[in-house]
């Protein structure tokens, strides 16, 4: 009998890169579109998506020096 897998993570850490400001922006949101709604007006490129479990790994030493956290 097949079961439908349910997602185990409700929120993700989304990382975008702003080419105009030359910095990374990190947002916690459920979907990419929700994360993009928190971004500034200038275009940003999707860079990565991490689970919230990755917060322990994404510490000061692993984040780029110019990463800005939103929300």
Image (tube, grey):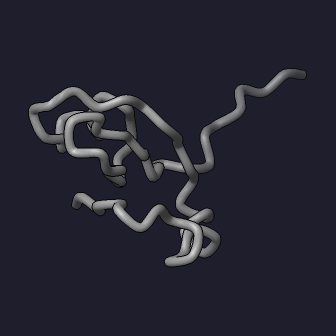
Q: Quadrant of the N terminus?
A: top right
**Residue 34, image x, y percentages:** 27, 36
Considering every residue shown, the one lying at the far left of the view is 41
Horizontal arrangement in the rendering, residue 23 relative to residue 57 (left or right) = left
Q: Quadrant of residue 44?
A: top left
Residue 22 lies, with reference to residue 44, above or below; the image says below
Up-down relation of residue 59 to residue 27 (above or below): below
Identify the residue at horizontal 54%, vertical 75% (top origin).
59
Q: Residue 53 location in percent, x, y?
A: 61, 64
Image location (x, y in percent) of residue 30: 39, 42
Residue 22's image quarter? top left
Residue at position x 71%, y 33% from top?
A: 5
- Residue in the foreground of this view, choosing between 9 and 21: 21
Residue 46 spot, x, y in % from top left: 42, 31
Q: What is the number of callouts on the image?
A: 0
Point 47% across, 49% down: residue:
12
Q: Nearer the viewer, residue 17 or 51?
A: 17
Left or right placement of residue 62 versus residue 64 in this view: right
Residue 25 against residue 33 in the figure, above or below = below
Q: Where 30 falls versus 56 (above or below)?
A: above
Residue farthest right in this picture: 1
Position of the C terminus by quadrant: bottom left
């Amino acid at each position: 009998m097949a079961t439908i897998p349910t997602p185990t993570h409700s929120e993700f850490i989304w990382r975008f890169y702003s080419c105009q400001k030359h910095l990374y922006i990190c947002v916690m949101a459920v979907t990419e579109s929700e994360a993009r709604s928190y971004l500034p007006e200038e275009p940003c490129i999707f860079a990565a998506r991490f689970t919230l479990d990755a917060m322990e790994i994404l510490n000061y030493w692993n984040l780029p020096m110019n990463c800005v956290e939103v929300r």
